[in-house]
Each structure stands twice: as C-alpha cells, then as structure tokens.
Amino acid sequence: MSVSFNKQLCEKALRECYHDATCKGGLIEFTQQIRTYENNFQGKYSVTQEDLTKLFSEKVWRDCKKVGGHRKIENIVTGTVIEYANHDNSRGIDPGAVMTIFSAVQEHLNILCNQIFAYKINNWKNEPDYLASVERFIALKK
C-alpha cells in the first residue's frame, strides 16, 4: 500500500514539475527570455525580483531557509539548488547572478527532459508518460 502511495506522490510531483516548466511564465519561457531570439543572452539584463519570485512553485521547490537576504531553494525531484540575493533590486537582478540561475534552471530542465521524462522527440510539446517517468525517477534516486 505505501509503495503505490509513494508512486502517487512521485507522479504528482512530476506533474507539477512539468507544469512549472511549460506554463506561461514558466521555466522554459524564462530560459527563452534570457537567451532571446538572437541567442545572445541579452535577457539577463531585464530580470526582476518579481520574475524570480513567481518562477519557482512552492509545490516542487523547497525553501532551504537561507539567512542574510538570500533565497535558497531546492527542487524536490531533481535536487537542483538555486540561490540568489533576495533584496529589493529595483534596477533588476545582477546579470551574472541571472546567468547562474539560468544555468541551474537549464540543468534542472535537462534532468527532467533526458533522465526522467525521457523525451526523444517533441520535447515538452506533449505531457510525458508519468507512470514510466515515476519508474525512471525511482531508478535514478537509487
């Protein structure tokens, strides 16, 4: 009984991760915003604190309680850790910090896409097979 319950929780977390990645204003859109159409990463100059606050869902990102004006979160599925200054940045987030966040988000998306959801074609265009993804996730965690 408990094994299926854990699998149900895993499936729910994977569904939330897929939603966080693909929803409007989600992680994939964030990476596209940073890269820009020209692929020159000019979007790193326009990220605000509000953008980051909305980006990471509390359903799958665990707050690691960092002190000193920083926010540290960890994804409960991939284990990806993201840390950034959580100050009032009315002029935007430091572009170097944005690139660090971008890299961590891209790593998170790659783990989901390649190792857990195992997309081969049409990455992120269709929802994955969650039952098979749960099995891959459990194998990955062993």
Image (cartoon, rainbow, N blue to C red):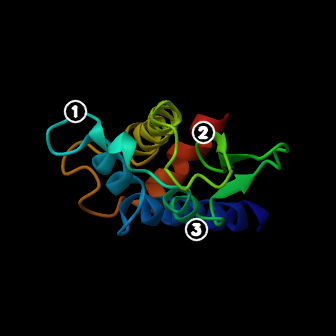
CA separation in Å, label 2 and label 3: 18 Å
Query: Looking at the picture, which amino acid does disc 1 mark?
Result: Asn
Please rate how many residues cluster around mark 1, counting C-alpha atoms within 10 Å: few if below 14, some from 14 to 19, many from 20: few
CA separation in Å, label 1 and label 2: 25 Å
Q: Marks 1 and 3: CB-CB under 8 Å?
A: no
Quadrant (top left, top right, bottom left, bottom right) of the N terminus: bottom right
Number of numbered discs overlaid on the protein picture: 3
| Label whose residue precedes the other's in the sequence (1 or 2) | 1
CA separation in Å, label 1 and label 3: 36 Å
Please rate how many residues cluster around mark 2, counting C-alpha atoms within 10 Å: few if below 14, some from 14 to 19, many from 20: some
Q: Which mark is residue 40?
A: 1
The residue under label 2 is 80
Residue at (38% x, 38% y) in the render: 114
The residue under label 3 is 12
Seen in the image, is 102 located left or right of residue 137? left
The correct choice, above or below, for 139 with respect to 55 in the image is above
Element class at badge 1: loop
Residue at (67% x, 46% y) in the render: 74
| Label whose residue precedes the other's in the sequence (2 or 3) | 3
- Of 26 and 41, nearer the camera is 41
Element class at badge 2: loop
Give the foreground label among 1 and 2: 1
Q: Marks 2 and 3: CB-CB under 8 Å?
A: no
- Of 112 and 31, nearer the camera is 31
Query: Looking at the picture, which amino acid does disc 3 mark?
Result: Lys
